[in-house]
Every structure is written in structure tokens, then in C-alpha cells.
Amino acid sequence: MSGSSYVAVDWGTSSFRLWQMNAGGQVLGERRSDQGMTVAAKTGFASVLQSHLDALGGPADLPVVICGMAGARQGWVEAGYLDTPAHLSDILSAAVVVSGQPRDIRILPGIAQRDAAAPDVMRGEETQLLGALGLDAAREALVCMPGTHSKWVRVRGGMVEGFATFMTGELFSAVVRDTILSHAVAEADEAVDADAFGAAVAEAFAAPALSANLLFRVRARQLLFAGSAQAARETISGTLIGVELAAGLAEREHATPVTLIASGRLQRLYQIALERLSIPFNVMDAEEAVRRGLASAATAIWKN
């Protein structure tokens, strides 16, 4: 590597994040844009990457390690899936080379759960796991990664044993936009109503089978008791997250803390939810986790 520096890229469906880093993991420069896979598939992955590298002014032979949707079937180069159970170290050895490029570019694979009863896939989150737990993780971990499609992952001795995806964020967007509850949340802002949210989490966690009824109660409560749009919004969010937690925590070993990999508003919401349910947890920032994971990959691939 040029001066032991490299470029780490988290290439999502709608977002692009790039960091130039040194061998010690220090960020030397960064770039962000909305040129995710959807945009790059039309304009060209190579040209998008090069435009950001040019803006940083790094050496022409600076190597690049990428995780995320650039490795999807509809991405730049398909970097398939490792099957569970998969050791986190396997992610590094399965990186795919992007051929025909003037620099060394590797894309990390995702992880698949090829279980006919519970099929599932992740792409990008495996790198966050690597960054949060490390290659030598000996302990058992239950990891929660909130998002549009939240992931709950069981890891033991560095081995991803299984995981489940929950469409919580996407369902929330659909419910507040395309159902009768859109009227209930009109003009609500982004502020967190911790009381309304926490109460909804606890109620849905205790009776997840009632989730559809709990959601309709949001509308009925507002009509009959004049609840605020803010409380309605947080109750919808808390109900959906409470249902997710009921499933995600079902296989938790007693006293095992949840490792929460999140940032921003979602981090705060899930912390409130776990505290309300008296579940112990530790937190790592999602962006720090993916950077650490990409740094581990770069170190292993180029042996610096």
C-alpha cells in the first residue's frame, strides 16, 4: 500500500461514504454523497469512486476496500455470500477483486442464512460485526443493528451462527405515509417523546400478537382523547420496535447484554426501548463499527 494508506468505502443502496485511512486506522480524509448503488449503477461505479478519490488527491495506486451494496448482484461486481455458520475472519479471505482497474480494489462478501424455514441475507452489516466484535471475539454476543431493515445476529466465538432481519424501519415509513394513521401523525416533528415511545414498546413487547390492534388504537385514542401528533408518531414507532424486540430477544441467553450498533436517532430510540425493558446493553456507533471492520479487512488483505 502507498505509504501504508488505503481507502475504505461503505457503499449502500442510497448512500456513499469513503475514508482515506492510514495503517493505524486514523482517518486522513473523507467523502460522502448520495451516490449509492442506485445512482452508481446508472452513472458507473468506477467513475463515482474515481471522482471522490480525485477530490481527496491521494496516490494513484491507493488500494480500496469496499463493503455494502457495491457487491450485490446488481452492483459493481458480485461478491456473493458466505453461508452461516460463518466465521468473521472468512469475510476477509472471500473478498472479490474488481478486475480491469488501475488500482487494487476489493469488495467484501455478505452473509446468507440458507435455511428454507428462515432464509435471510445481510450485506454491509457483516463488516459492522467485524468492527464491533473483532476477529478474536471469544464471547457470545447478541447484536442488534437498527435500520430500515434491522438485523439481530447471534455470534459465538467469532462465528455468525444465525440472524434475522426485521423490516421495522420500512414498515414505519409505510404506516405513517400510506395508512389511516397518516392523519394521526400530520405535523409531528422529529423530537422524541420518550414517555409515549417507551409505553408503546412495553405494551407491544408484552403482547406482540396484538400489534395490528395496538396500531389502530393510535387513531382511536387521538379521536376520543385528543392525543398529540407527536405522541401518535412515537407510539407507532414504539409499537413496531417493541414487536421487533419481542422476537429479537426471544433467543437471548439470560444476562447476555445486547450489543447495539447504531447511531443518531435510532440509537436513542433503541436505548430507551432496552432500558424500558431492563435489558442490559452496550453501544457502538454504527459508522465507527463499519470503519473498524474495513480497517481489519485492509490489514488482513494487504498485510500492513
Image: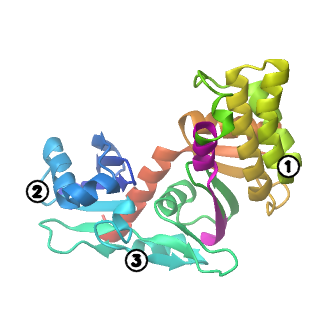
The CA span between labels 2 and 3 is 25 Å
Q: Amino acid at mark 3?
A: Ala
Tag in front: 1 or 3: 1
SS for dot 3? loop
Task: Write down the residue under mark 3.
Answer: 94
Residue sitting at x 62%, y 48%: 171
Q: Amino acid at mark 1?
A: Leu
Q: What is the count of numbered marks?
A: 3
- CB under 8 Å between discs 1 and 2: no
Please state if 93 lies on the left or on the right of 185 as rendered: left
Residue sitting at x 59%, y 46%: 169
Tag in front: 1 or 2: 1
Residue 193 visible in this rendered orientation of the protein: no
Q: In the rendering, at what x and y percent does residue 30 appear?
A: 28, 41
Compared with residue 190, is residue 84 higher up or lower down, i.e. above or below? below
Give the mark nearer the N terminus: 2 vs 3.
Answer: 2
Q: In the rendering, at what x and y percent does residue 10 appear?
A: 37, 53
Residue 60: which disc?
2
Give the mark nearer the N terminus: 1 vs 3.
Answer: 3
Task: Write down the residue under mark 1.
Answer: 210
Query: Which residue is more in the foreground, 214 or 270?
Result: 214
Q: Which residues are magenta?
A: 154-177
Q: Residues within 10 Å of mark 3 (few under 14, many from 20)?
A: some
Residue sitting at x 51%, y 61%: 130
SS for dot 1? helix
Q: Residues within 10 Å of mark 1 (few under 14, many from 20)?
A: some
The CA span between labels 1 and 2 is 58 Å
The CA span between labels 1 and 3 is 43 Å
Quarter of the image with the N terminus in it: bottom left
